[in-house]
Image (cartoon, helix red, strand yellow):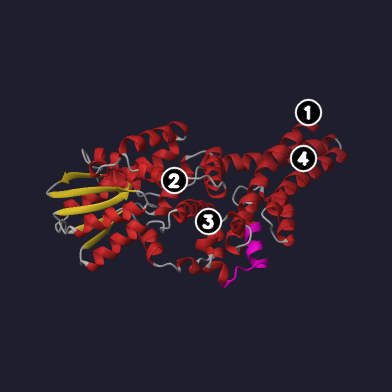
Amino acid sequence: MDTTEDIVKTVHCKQTAVTLIGTAHISKKSVELVEEMVRTGDHDCIAVELCRPRYDSLINKTGWKNLDIYRIFREKKATLLLVNLALTAFQKRLAEKFGVEVGMEMQRAIELAREHDVRLELIDRDISTTLHRLLNKVSFWQKLKLFAGLIAGIFVDEEITEDQIEDLKRGDLLHAVVEEFGEKLPAIKEVLIDERDQYMAGQLARIAAADDAPKHIVAMVGAGHLRGMVSEFAAPPGEERMRELEQKPPPRRIGYFIGWAIGVFILSMFYVGYRHSPELGWQLLVTWVVVNGGLSALGAALALAHPGSVLTAFVAAPLTSLNPTIGAGMVVGLVESYLRKPQVRDFESLRDDITHWKMWWKNRVVRVFLVFFFANMGSVFGTYIAGASIVHQLFG
């Protein structure tokens, strides 16, 4: 049985007392605990584990309607949005089991802050920065494993009891889960948990060091951050570290160079084959187009793309695979969004549709990103399979 001491910790920073409340973002009891703690009135500031974009999304339920698909593809943010959709769907699906909204405890804290005219602070790092750092730090296979795990969590109907959710607020159990996660995928744990522990502790330390510092802050954070944040308060990160945590790292140059190297290698294989005999040169070219384009087109077809998008994948993949500045998925996604323009009802139902796996293939907004993802994956596998076949035909 949980006690309040397990999920409520008080630390001191400068002259400010900070009461950290560990919550489960899909828990009814977390909402009740937030109401109980806030209504005591023994505080002059409420802090929540939200950044500005997540705050706006929580408050503005129609925010998805302003989604600019063309801009997302142009700015190469499709992968970020797809991961964000998967994360949102995973939490929302669990929340539906217990009749609560995702982040309801945060929403209730915001409402109570307004009702009681109490200062409200957003202390989490910007979600786009976190996702940028996550995708930059982990390998391609780890990204694939993470996304596959999220999708499985959405699509596999595994029964989870409310007691299991409440158990996540127990420090010892949660610590064990986090440690296990860190052993398997340490880079993901570092970005999603450790860095945000530091950042949120640093944000609270900033607030406590300001001229208008409150005397007592009540901070609502996910239970997964409670233990880490308490330890961070022993020596909160300074401004230099905070600026570092706020940086969006540039794309890895090694991937860029590897992409160009693959392109040069494949073109050189065509040249070697043609010098050996024109027939062999054409055979290698056909292998490249059929395998690379075929697998990308297959991926688009699995996402139930428009026939025009499937054809685009077949044509675009062999070309984009030779140029690392553009991916097949981006081209095919743009074509899909043009041929099957998402309708108003797709945006209006997006928040609900993402929690049901069948709707991922029916909602035109989500399907655009599935087409992007599967066409890209087909092209990636096609590049390596076709490349291996070309080498085998030349030297095998």
Alpha carbon distance from label 1 to label 2: 58 Å
Looking at the picture, how far across and down is residue 210, in whole percent?
Answer: 17, 55
For label 1, the residue is: 395
Q: Secondary structure at mark 2?
A: loop
Q: Nearer the viewer, residue 286 or 15?
A: 15
Please state if 147 lies on the left or on the right of 192 as rendered. right
If you read the primary sequence from the N terminus, does the residue marked by circle 3 or circle 2 appear first?
2
Residue bounds of the magenta highlight: 332-344
The amino acid type, in three-letter code, at marker 2 is Thr
Residue 354 magenta-highlighted = no
For label 3, the residue is: 355
For label 2, the residue is: 161
Q: Give neighbour class at mark 1: few <14, some 14-19, many 20+ (Cα, 10 Å).
A: few
Q: Nearer the viewer, residue 301 or 265?
A: 301
Q: Secondary structure at mark 1?
A: helix
Return the residue found at the far top.
Answer: 396
Secondary structure, magenta segment, majority class: helix
If you read the primary sequence from the N terminus, does the residue marked by circle 2 or circle 4 appear first?
2
The amino acid type, in three-letter code, at marker 1 is Phe
Please, is residue 90 above or below residue 233 in the view? below
The amino acid type, in three-letter code, at marker 3 is Thr
Q: Give neighbour class at mark 3: few <14, some 14-19, many 20+ (Cα, 10 Å).
A: many
If you read the primary sequence from the N terminus, does the residue marked by circle 4 or circle 3 appear first?
4
Which quadrant of the view contains residue 182?
top left
For label 4, the residue is: 270
If you read the primary sequence from the N terminus, does the residue marked by circle 1 or circle 2 appear first?
2
